[in-house]
């Protein structure tokens, strides 16, 4: 169950990171509220996963999911650049997440 909580926390990190963009520096009320709620929920699920997962592994996986998801959503939603090196670096992050998962 702890990995499920960690996955939820990671996806919520993507949600609030994208929300930061839409909140425009916390000047738009609804996107700002959604961002703060996403942050709180993300931290809550991360804390649940930490009841049984090592902090280093859980934190790295959480931020890795957030990093990869945010980059991909940035490409899709905000037309951020896509290039071979950028995608290769994302794959390195994914490889690290998989490596941490299988070593536990």
Image: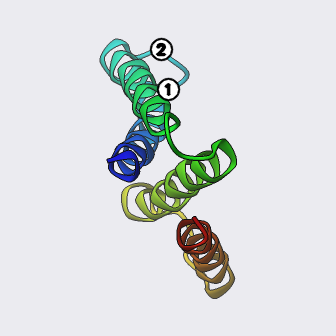
Q: Residue at x 56, y 55 (%)?
A: 61
Depth order, front residue of 83/44: 44
Toward which corner of the image does residue 98 lie, by quadrant?
Answer: bottom right
Q: Residue under label 1, please give it.
A: 24
Q: Residue at x 50, y 56 (%)?
A: 65
For mark 2, give the secondary structure.
Answer: loop
Q: Residue at x 61, y 74 (%)?
A: 99
| Above or below, 56 relative to 24 | below
Residue 86: % across, % down: 64, 76
| Above or below, 51 relative to 80 | above
Residue 27: % across, % down: 47, 14
Q: Which corner quadrant holds the C terminus?
A: bottom right
Left or right of 16: which side holds 68? right
Residue 58: % across, % down: 57, 48
Q: Residue under label 2, please give it.
A: 27
Residue 40: % across, % down: 43, 21
For mark 1, give the secondary structure.
Answer: loop
CA neighbours of label 2 inside 10 A, class few (<14), some (14 to 19), many (20+): few
Depth order, front residue of 89/9: 9
C-alpha distance separating marks 1 and 2: 6 Å
Depth order, front residue of 64/73: 64
Q: Are marks 1 and 2 in contact (CB under 8 Å)?
A: yes
Q: Residue at x 43, y 19 (%)?
A: 36
Mark identifier at residue 43: none
The image's colouring method is: rainbow
């Amino acid at each position: 169950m702890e990995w499920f909580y960690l996955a939820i926390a990671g996806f919520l990190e993507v949600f609030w990171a994208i929300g930061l963009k839409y909140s425009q520096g916390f000047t738009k009320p609804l996107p700002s509220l959604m961002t703060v709620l996403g942050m709180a929920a993300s931290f809550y699920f991360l804390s649940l996963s930490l009841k049984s997962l090592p902090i280093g592994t859980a934190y790295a996986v959480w931020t890795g999911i957030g990093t990869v998801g945010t980059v991909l959503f940035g490409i899709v939603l905000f037309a951020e650049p896509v290039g071979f090196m950028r995608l290769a670096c994302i794959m390195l992050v994914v490889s690290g997440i998989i490596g941490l998962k299988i070593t536990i």
